[in-house]
Amino acid sequence: MGAGKSAVAQELVRSSAGPTAYIEGDLYWRFFAKPRSDGDAGRAFRTVMRAMIASARHFKRDGYDVVLDFSIPPWYLDATRALLTGEPFDYVVVCPSEAVCASRAASRAEGRIDDYAPYHDLYLSFDPEDRHAIADDESDAETIAALVRSSLSSGCFRVE
C-alpha cells in the first residue's frame, strides 16, 4: 500500500543477527492459479492469511525470527491469535500519512498503484495512534527498522 513496509522489512532482515525467514505476503496471491468463481475477496484474503501464518509458525518453531511483510489489518489480530494457538507474536504497523502512501505507491517500479482510492478504506482501518503503529512521514527505512528493532526488544509490539 506504499507505507514503506517492504523496505523496512528488508532492512530488518539485513540487520538481523540470527537466522531469519522473510515472508513476502504479496507472493501468496500468486498461488491462486485458478481463482474461485464466486469472487469472494474476503475468503481469498482469509486463505492467504492462514497460509502465511502457518508458514511463519513453522519457521518460528524451527528457530527462525520471522519477518512477515504484508498489510495485516488490526481487525484480523484475533484470528491471527487463534491461528497461532496462544503463541505470542509482535505486530508492527508502518503507518505514514495516506498522502505519503499514495505517492510511494504511484512511484513504484513494480506493482505501481496510480489510483489509491480503492485502498482508502483499508488505510483508514489502521490507527496511527495505536501502540503498534509507527506514524512517520520523514524517516528512511533504516531509521524505522532500528526503531522497530529496539521496540521489539522492549516488548512494545508484543501481542499475547
Image: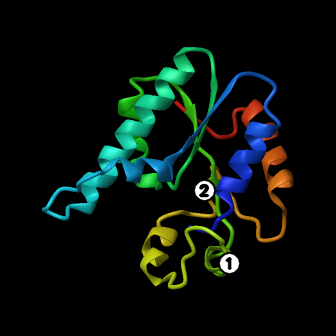
Going from N to C along the chain, the mark reached first, 1 or 2, is 1
- Is residue 29 placed above or below 108 in the rendered structure? above
Q: Label 2 belongs to which residue?
A: 130
Secondary structure of the residue carrying tag 1 is: loop
Q: Position of residue 128 (x, y in %)?
A: 63, 64
Q: Position of residue 155 (x, y in %)?
A: 70, 33
Question: From this viewpoint, is residue 154 visible?
Answer: no
Q: Position of residue 138 (x, y in %)?
A: 83, 70
- Is residue 56 placed above or below 68 in the rendered structure? above
Report if the CB atoms under discs 1 and 2 are less than 8 Å apart.
Answer: no
Question: Residue 143 versus residue 44: which sits nearer the camera?
Answer: 44
Residue at x 23%, y 54% (from the top left corner): 34
Q: Amino acid at mark 1?
A: Ser
Question: Which quadrant holds residue 12?
Answer: top right
- Is residue 24 placed above or below 3 in the rendered structure? above
Outermost front residue:
33
Question: Which quadrant holds residue 49?
Answer: top left
Secondary structure of the residue carrying tag 2 is: loop
Question: Residue 29 versus residue 91: which sits nearer the camera?
Answer: 29
Q: Position of residue 76 (x, y in %)?
A: 40, 49
Neighbor class of circle 2 (other Cα within 10 Å; few <14, some 14-19, many 20+) is: few
Image colouring: rainbow
The N terminus sits in image quarter: bottom right
Q: Label 1 belongs to which residue?
A: 107
Residue at x 54%, y 77% (from the top left corner): 113
Q: Amino acid at mark 2?
A: Asp
Question: From this viewpoint, is residue 122 visible?
Answer: yes
